Amino acid sequence: MTAVARRPHLSERLSDAVVARSDNGAVAALLANDSASIREKTLDTLIAVAATHQQWQETLVRRTGLPPQATLALAAVVADHLLEPLAARTDLDPTLARVLRARVDLRLERRGGGALPPELAFEEAGLRGDRITMLRLLAEQTGVPARAVEHAAQCAAARRLSASAGRPASRRAAACRRKACSARSPPAPAYPCRRPATGR
């Protein structure tokens, strides 16, 4: 199975088959094979198990093209001596690099479960695709009720949808504008709103 794991351009289906065999050596070879395609769900599972497999940790830290969520998950499980190499990767999105650096610093200070500053917490939620946390943080920092922030986000989404379709504002977007005129509009977000980064 290790020989299979080392094949170039291994498909996701075959990668799943290697993992299903629960052969530690084969899995390590698979993770070291940068051309192998691994499903994000499978990768998440391997990272969770890697907490007790240091050989996997070292390979994961070096693996190219890790999705943002997988990279952040690694920062919570790898051994201390691997934190700096993980944070020093040069292929990280700038937002991910900032959040990862903060998470690594918290762990090295032995405050692994500590809270990030609000702006970094917002960016981390975006990287994880956690929209609920993003809206909660915006509400807390702007002093606007969570429902008003949610409504503003829905209006923005409706405007983007109508714009991408190349048509005049949709009825939903128009309704949003009318409702916004009769309610308190939330102030500008305290943080830049970025779309969550996507993996391969």
Image (cartoon, rainbow, N blue to C red):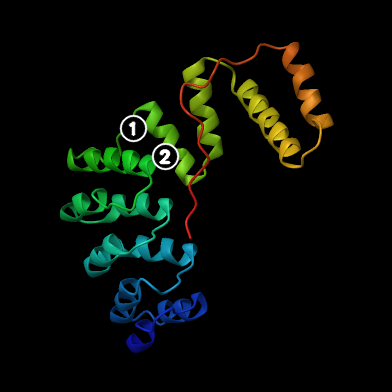
Q: Which circle marks residue 175 in the picture?
A: none
- Drawn side of residue 105 relative to residue 123, left or right: left
Q: Residues within 10 Å of mark 1 (few under 14, many from 20)?
A: some
The amino acid type, in three-letter code, at marker 2 is Glu
The number of callouts visible is 2
Task: Name the spot of residue 97 as percent of width and height, x first.
Answer: 32, 43
The amino acid type, in three-letter code, at marker 1 is Leu
- Drawn side of residue 5 relative to residue 171, left or right: left
Q: Gap in Å between the C-alphas at discs 1 and 2?
A: 9 Å
Name the residue beneath numbered marker 2.
124
Residue found 27% across the figure and 67% down from its top: 59
In the image, residue 186 above or below residue 196: above
Task: Name the spot of residue 114 as percent of width and height, x first.
Answer: 29, 35
- SS assignment at label 1: loop
Task: Name the spot of residue 22 as percent of width and height, x first.
Answer: 37, 79
Q: Nearer the viewer, residue 58 or 115?
A: 58
Q: Nearer the viewer, residue 77 or 28?
A: 28
Residue found 39% across the figure and 27% down from its top: 118
Name the residue beneath numbered marker 1.
116
Task: Determine contact: label 1, label 2, CB under 8 Å.
Answer: yes
In the image, residue 106 above or below residue 14: above
